Image (cartoon, helix red, strand yellow):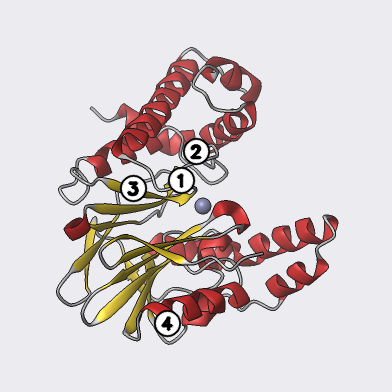
Amino acid sequence: MSVPQFQEVAPGTFVRRHSELDLNCGLVVGSRRALVIDTRSTTARGEGLAAAVREITPLEQVVVNTHAHYDHCFGNAAFRDSQIYAHVGAAASLQRTAEHQRSQVVEHLRRTERPDLAQTYVDTEVVLPFYLVDDEVTPIDLGDRTAYLLFGGRGHTDHDLVVAVPDVSTVFWADLIEQGADPAMDDSFPLEWGATLARLQEHPHVRDAQLHVPGHGEVVEPAFIAQQRATLSALADDLTSALAAGVQDVDGLVAKTRGLGLTDSTLRDAAVRTLETRSGAAEVNAAP
Ligand SMILES: [Zn+2]
């Protein structure tokens, strides 16, 4: 398997797309510091990423974990000397779920006869992010340029951070946007995700951006973001109408949400999460 290279998608702005899970990591290089966006899924893979970063810049590294899913932050140990930023909810989630996430991946890899890879997960030390933010906007000064961590509300998780780099008109969306596969619903808030995207799209650092990097898949254009937002907003509308009509079960919700271009498996996950999270969502919807 060939080693992935960082591709410079805009001046001083790089994307490294990995074969495992089609994961994208980002790198934004200033005059004093460089921002690394997500750290991959194991310490060994994180070390590979760190080496790739050093080929591009010797500057001090700052890291952001966009959210607490293992594929985005289990490589943190390779960056333990750096400031690691995340939303306060990401640190809490990682603390609560890391061992469960690890055991699920290890079990899956052993079942599919990849024991060596499974062992790299066993050997991985989970390092929690410790520069925790909960503001809507957190500027990261890199020297001569600033990257902004944006929190727009609940969506793929309850703590997704987006990274906007306005001087090159670029946004790293993490898993709030996914190319090549449906948005992943397992920990999501399906009734709120579309509205969160809408809020973020209106942000001055995002509004005019031309280059959009999803958490997984190809770099996309603004039309793709608009399309995914429309799909997720339509999903929320369909779910809301179905709940209002008294639909209370997963099969019923799936039947009411077909036709949006999402697979039944995605709709099923969305339905499960809707039923799990709707008391909080009902409060939001009940607001005048
Ligand atoms: Zn994720």
Q: Quadrant of the C terminus?
A: top left
Label 2: which residue?
Answer: 277
Within 8 Å of ligand 1, the CB of disc 1? yes
Residue 44 percent coordinates (x, y): 62, 77
Residue 268 percent coordinates (x, y): 62, 30
Q: Residue 156: which numbered mark, if any?
A: 1
SS for callout 1: loop
Q: Quadrant of the N terminus?
A: bottom right
Q: Residue 253: which numbered mark, if any?
A: none
What's the CA distance linking mark 1 and mark 3? 17 Å
Is the C-beta separation of discs 1 and 2 under 8 Å?
Answer: no
Label 3: which residue?
Answer: 212
Q: Earlier in the sequence, mark 3 or mark 2?
A: 3
What's the CA distance linking mark 4 and mark 1? 31 Å
Label 4: which residue?
Answer: 54
Q: Is residue 221 left or right of residue 276?
A: left
Q: Residue furthest top?
A: 245
Q: Amino acid at mark 1?
A: His
Q: Earlier in the sequence, mark 1 or mark 3?
A: 1
Residue drawn 46% across the image and 81% down it: 79
Q: Amino acid at mark 2?
A: Thr
Q: Nearer the viewer, residue 101 or 21?
A: 21
Q: How many marks?
A: 4
Residue 72 percent coordinates (x, y): 51, 62
Residue 201 percent coordinates (x, y): 25, 41
Neighbours of disc 4 within 10 Å: few (<14), some (14-19), many (20+): few
Q: Is residue 249 left or right of residue 166?
A: right
Q: Is residue 4 above or below residue 230?
A: below
Q: Amino acid at mark 4?
A: Arg
Q: Nearer the viewer, residue 86 or 275?
A: 86
Neighbours of disc 1 within 10 Å: few (<14), some (14-19), many (20+): many
